[in-house]
Amino acid sequence: MLNCILVIDDDAITRQLYSMILEEMEVSDRVEAFPYGVQAIEFINTFTPEIILMDLNMPGIDGFEVIEELNKNKNRREMKVIVMSAHFAKGQQTKIKELGVDNYITKPLSEEKVNEVLLKPQMKKN
């Protein structure tokens, strides 16, 4: 079981739903959720989650900027970053790979996607 999964999404309903799915699946001892990248970065500076599920399109600091900040964190190698989006615009997948994201999935999140992407030792691209 994982120690902590962090969900970053500005949509409150999405954040609650994903947190609920993860808690019901009992894949982690702790699920934290934040609406904004700034809050998530502050959390990550004091605690290292094993998995970060993050929306790309957020107000303020977007997902790309959050990833750039994560890459500066001394514990980055201990965190798997998985980007979520309803759709990926042309070039976004390339940029995601260049930034060292571990995986990306299309919304909505489901138990099936959690099993496929989070729990398998080898991350695969969807």
Image: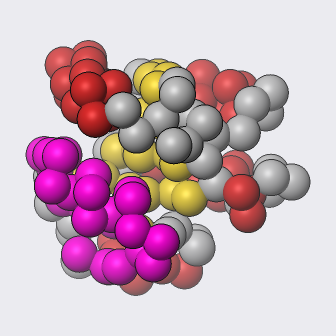
The image position of residue 74, as x and y in percent, is 86, 54
Q: Is residue 37 visible?
A: no
**Residue 105 drawn in magenta:** yes
Above-or-below relation of 5 to 23: below
In the image, the segment drawn in magenta is 104-126
Identity of the residue drawn at 73% across and 63% down: 77
Report the side of 3 relative to 123 (left or right): right
Q: Quadrant of residue 44?
A: top right
Identity of the residue drawn at 57% across and 34% down: 4
Above-or-below relation of 61 to 23: below
Above-or-below relation of 107 to 12: below
Report the side of 21 relative to 110 (left or right): right
- Nearest the camera: 18 or 43? 18
**Residue 112 drawn in magenta:** yes
Q: Is residue 48 visible?
A: yes
Identity of the residue drawn at 45% across and 78% down: 122
- Nearest the camera: 39 or 44? 44
Above-or-below relation of 53 to 122: above
Report the side of 83 relative to 80 (left or right): left
The image position of residue 67, as x and y in percent, is 58, 55
The image position of residue 107, as x and y in percent, is 16, 50
Identity of the residue drawn at 23% across and 75% down: 126
